[in-house]
Amino acid sequence: MIADQKMTRWSHLGFTLFLFFSSELILFTKSAYASEPRTPNNGSEILENLSATSNQQSNKLKTLRKNLETSPNNLDLASQLAKAYIGIARENTDVRYYGYAQAVLKPWWEKQNPPVEALLLRATLNQQRHQYTKAIDDLKLLLKRQPRHAQAWLTLSIIQQVQGNYQSARASCSALSRVSSIWLSNLCHSQVLGYTGSTERAYKMQQALALQLKTSRPDLLQWILGISAETALRMGKKKQAEINFEKALKLPLRDAYLLRIYSDYLLEENREAVVLKLLKDEEKDSALLLRMAIAAKRANQKQLMSDYQKLLESRFKAARLRGSNLHERDEALYLLEFAGDLKKALKLARNNWNVQKEPDDALILLRAALASHSETDVQTIRNWIAQTQLQDFRIQKLLDKPETGATDV
Amino acid sequence: MFRKFLLLALLIFPFAVNAHTPSSSYLFINEDAAELQLRWDIALRDLEFVIGLDSNQDQKISWQEVKDKQQEITAYAYSNLSLNRDNKSCQLETINLQVVEHTDGSYAVLKVQPECKASSGLMSVDYSLLFDVDANHRGIILDQRQENTNSYIASPDKQNIKISEGKDQKTGFNNFTTFVTQGNWHILIGFDHILFIVTLMLPAVLLYRRKQWIAVDEFRPAIISLLKIVTAFTIAHSITLSLAILEVVSLPSRWVESAIALSVILVAVNNIKPLFIHSRWSMAFLFGLIHGFGFASVLNNLELNSGSLLLSLLGFNVGVEIGQGLTLLLLFPLAYLLRKSNLYQTYILKFGSLLISLLASVWLVQRIAV
């Protein structure tokens, strides 16, 4: 009897240990960084699809690269090539090309006071990496030397808007109006108005701007329609937002930013099936991948959700290995949506808020704050709204009724 | 005006779209039978940019195209990497070329056997791959010679990386102790787990006969009853903890946290009005399964390092057991000594359980309402 009991106790222990070690073994072989290297059986197996650059484009690039190799300090050549790279980076949403552009500008990158052209490109690349302070310093330096530089004023205003520095942004728009077209300065002003309480007026201006635009510029038209849709959403006017989204999506261009804001809207409207269909081929874009994961979760597509989740997590991990913080807002959203570490979500949302202050940044901080019951962070947003007069339907809804979606568990 | 407009349009878009990650290569350092082994993963898209892999210009890279360029790939790669040991450089010899999929595309894998003059001493890496053409490129160096992977980032500003020699496994051990502390800490601050096990312990020194509690005569049946409960609880939470960490099962945390609160209520009520008298160990097992998911959410948040998962998971569990053991070691002798008194049988057992069930009910309401 006693022996029996001893047996069972020991077999329990043995079983426990067995469970431990067997699970450990599986865990241990699961590689954390990538799948296992392999040797393809077939030489014709396609390993990578390159983003399509036309032959003409790539020939032009080749010539530029070759010429630059012989005279790497020629700013004219360097800026031509850097601009071409930035263009490709934007067109294909491929950030590698920003790194290529920066490398081309190496002789001027560390200089205190490089030529105007180098300053502008350096500011643009720093803006892209969220190095807003550096970008602003360069632009201010540039404008001191060339106060009539329209592009510099516009870029400066846009960065100031991202930082939530609306007074300076407005001043930059006014400066822009003195050196550029009314159309462009109106566009600039309409954005600032839209962030500072005159949302209705901003919307009307943006609609008018879209009408004035030549049809030969579908990219600009798409951009304004997207902004317009966002402005409408901030007023809570879903119908208008929808109309603008539809017009923008009909244009023969696929813009990642537009897809992101549209899918956020669709998710709010519980139209996850549309998101899954719309973004089907956009896995390479992490922000869109996150939206697909959320949509899959809501549509109860467990396998799909877990596939997307795994991919996203390895992306976040790869970014962390590089020491990059460019994904903070999306990572915070990910943690909130997938019942992750709420404290970490709040930390990331706060870090992001310290860098940029667009309505989407405020929204994510508010959601994280409500999920972790952090009254001080909620107050940060309340103060921000009081200070800027920002009108945003989604933020207001959360502040009025915090239980409606802080975490969608 | 429109010309100016065109010029502007290039740079007008303010949105930083971070599709695709910037370029990284991964250099893994391993040791096999005291021989250094390197594995270097370089993105095909990067090699295409610097060497040109797409020979037939169809905007696709095939395995054949990669194989054909093996010479160029290794020549380019090794001219941008030097591995030094004890300040002497090592000869890099390719064993084979393979491919691997990373999260942002396909990579060429160079398996490298370094021939070093010194077999020990400080190791350092000079890394300059792609830096001349891509200022955002980073070399991620992952030293996997110990349980814990140490990672280093080579950048244009920091091309010389010194690899620390932690031969004594100290880091692995530190990691283990960290997780023991975490597990221990969790059971102590995770008041619901400790309350659960204490509530289960309370009647272990008693027997339920003719609808009332009487004290056990001997120590032996009391301790056996307790051991059964603890063992069942341990097995159960180990199972679900492992399953959850393995991602075999995942449950929403609200559900788990509510179920844990509910388990405390049921166990407490069972003390007042026994229903499962003979199989408290099966209650411990059943509810232990749920508590394991609760532990998993904590462990998941501790940023598991895959190289040290074995130690981490074991450490965490050991920590949980220590916390649990210490509490019981403190309370069980007390319970045994007091078991015959009215104080124990009425106040501690019944009122105590009532209080516990009330407290757990508050938790339950809070957790459901979150």
Image (cartoon, coloured by chain):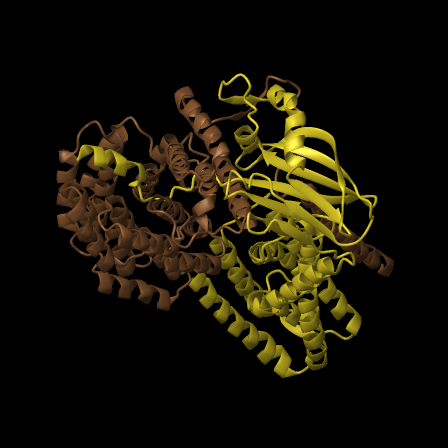
Chain colours: A brown, B yellow
The image quadrant where one finds the N terminus of chain A is bottom right
Identify the residue at image location x=15%, y=48%.
A178
In this view, the residue in front, B137 or B211, is: B137
Q: Quadrant of residue A41?
A: top right
Identify the residue at image location x=40%, y=56%.
A352
Q: Position of residue B97 (x, y in %)?
A: 69, 29
Identify the residue at image location x=63%, y=66%.
B197
Identify the residue at image location x=83%, y=59%.
A6
Q: Taking A18 as reference, is B78 above or below it?
A: above
* A342 displayed left or right of B76: left
In this view, the residue in front, B357 or B173, is: B173
Q: Taking A369 as reference, is A53 above or below it?
A: above
In this view, the residue in front, A122 or A355, is: A122
Q: Residue furthest right?
A: A3
Q: Position of residue A246 (x, y in %)?
A: 24, 32
In this view, the residue in front, B23 or A49, is: B23
Q: Position of residue B112 (x, y in %)?
A: 73, 36
* A337 displayed left or right of B205: left
Q: Position of residue A7 (x, y in %)?
A: 83, 55
* B323 displayed left or right of A119: right
